[in-house]
Image (tube, helix red, strand yellow):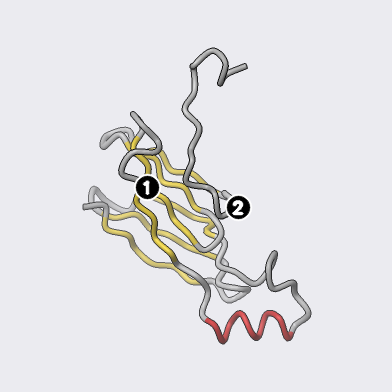
Amino acid sequence: DLLLSNSCIPFLGSTEGLDFRTLLLDEERGRLLIGAKDHIFLLNLVDLNKNVKKIYWPAAKEKVELCKLAGKDAHTDCANFIRVLQPYNRTHVYVCGTGAFHPLCGYIELG
């Protein structure tokens, strides 16, 4: 119904079949950050498909191998699922992912 009434814009950048986990709305800059499987997307709120920025942040290969050795599924468990997107200050966002069962965190500069 939303598509037929032209009251929504679908995000076309998810063709990789990514598993979206967390969102952070940056109203001040008109952006939306999306945490997904091995990726962080930065979208423009006016047009979600315009100037999409994407950060590829997979788990380390050795962590993925350890995860598989522990009996986890390589495609559904052994990845870096982004779980935390938290404003840190005016220029940075604090980000954490599962890191194939070895959590890792960092900062993204929003410049």
Please rate how many residues cluster around mark 1, counting C-alpha atoms within 10 Å: few if below 14, some from 14 to 19, many from 20: many
Please rate how many residues cluster around mark 2, counting C-alpha atoms within 10 Å: few if below 14, some from 14 to 19, many from 20: few
Sequence-first disc among 2 and 1: 2
Residue 95: give its label.
none
Residue displayed at 54% across by 49% down: 15
Residue displayed at 74% across by 72% down: 73
Give the amino acid type for the residue marked by disc 2 in the picture: Gly
Residue extending farthest to the top is 5
Residue displayed at 53% across by 74% down: 59
In terms of depth relative to the viewer, which is nearer, 101 or 14? Answer: 14
For the N terminus, the quadrant is top right
Measuring from the top left, give residue 77's x and y in whole percent.
69, 68
The residues tagged by marks 2 and 1 sit, at their Cα atoms, a distance apart of 17 Å
Kindly report which numbered mark, 2 or 1, lies closer to the viewer in this rendering.
2
Q: Quadrant of residue 106?
A: bottom left
Q: What residue does disc 2 label?
A: 17
Measuring from the top left, give residue 7's x and y in whole percent.
49, 17
In terms of depth relative to the viewer, which is nearer, 102 or 60? Answer: 60
Left or right of 57 on screen, residue 101: right
In terms of depth relative to the viewer, which is nearer, 66 or 95? Answer: 66
Q: What residue does disc 1 label?
A: 42
